[in-house]
Image (cartoon, rainbow, N blue to C red):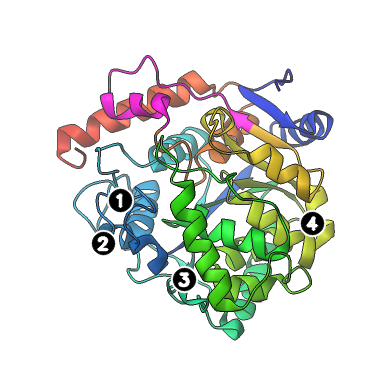
Amino acid sequence: MSNQLPIDAIAANEPEKARAFVEEALGKDFAYVCVIGTTDTSLIPGITVAGASPELTTYTPPADVEYVLLGRCRCIPAVPVTPEGIPTPALITRASIKLSNAPALVAVGGLKVKPKTPYINLGGEHGGDIRTGRALPRETVSEVYERAKLLGRELSKACDFLVIGESIPAGTTTALAVMVAVGVDAWGKVSSAMPNNPHQLKSEVVREALRNAGIEPGSCADDPLAAVSSVGDPVIPAFVGLVAGASKEVLVIAAGGTQMGAVLSLLKGLEPDALENVAIGTTRWILEDSSSDLVGLVKQIGRVPILAAKLDFSQTSAEGLRYYERGFVKEGVGAGGSAIAAMLKSKGEISAKRIAYEVERDYASLITKGYAE
């Protein structure tokens, strides 16, 4: 699985293309943009732990970007945690961006609670429960996609490569639904922020969603935005549009876990040439997750390299962070991709160990100030 690279990362797919991507981006400046959104799918009990309770998942995306930009959250009194008290991967993202002194932006796909930071509104809306088969208005999905393409094009003028992350609770479930709708065999392959991946629940939700939408597996292959409208979420069209717009001019790191399978599958249907300039940036925790299969998903879609940051919290003194080594959280808010970008910009001087040290120091500060559990 591994391939020697000049940074603390693993080339998990298409190793030659991964190395070429790294060599082209090495020493270059990047910008980071986080796409955030919410969906009522996250209110289904047991579907996600991206929040201390299902109701609080509505606050997780705005709180994530508030922490990335401000170093604390404003819409809630503490950083987002799982029910077990495990902190958001936004800590990794902030540490990586801070160490590399890179600009960070927020793009809103559709939210109930807006962040108390500057953000770019792409004109979307909060997503409905996909079990209805009517997640988002089709016209809105198309508009968000086109606006995001324009934003991606403009951002490409201001950086050498672009890192795109996301935050949306229940995003792996909506991604599963979209992938199946466009013809990707994703059953049992998406990840979870929990060690015990609730595949059965996710599959039941997705089957109900597809049934109520009148969608057979693969029937949306020629109209992938229809899949998003019926069973997707507001982050997907925004993320895909950003990649499609930016990748015409610069390299793009699609920063995330198995949700990136949905992003790539839509790009394949809408802007197939964009796949040539994209790499997935994730964490080794995603690769080591035996309950999911990011590599298998990507291989069905195209020859896209996967880079995984070799982050390690096993030696940290913070109990909440050590849970990452036990299969919790794994990825989110562009954590792996932003870490890889920091390593690339610094030509490896920013290491996985240095990022972990910065995360531990920031987390200790949050606890001291009462901003974390």
CB under 8 Å between discs 4 and 2: no
- What residue did someone put label 3 on? 131
Residue mark closest to the camera, 2 vs 3? 3
Q: Residue at x 60, y 44 (%)?
A: 189
Q: Earlier in the sequence, mark 3 or mark 1?
A: 1
Are discs 4 and 1 less than 8 Å apart at CB? no
Image quadrant of residue 229? Answer: bottom right
Q: Nearer the viewer, residue 242 or 58?
A: 58
Gap in angstroms between the C-alphas marked 4 and 2: 37 Å
Question: Along the polypeptide, which appears first: circle 2 or circle 3?
Answer: 2
Residue 39, by quadrant, is: bottom left
The CA distance from mark 3 to mark 4 is 31 Å
Q: Please give the label number shown on residue 51.
A: 1
Give the x, y percent position of residue 58.
Answer: 32, 63
Magenta residue span: 308-327
Whether tag 2 and tag 1 are in contact, CB under 8 A, the answer is: yes
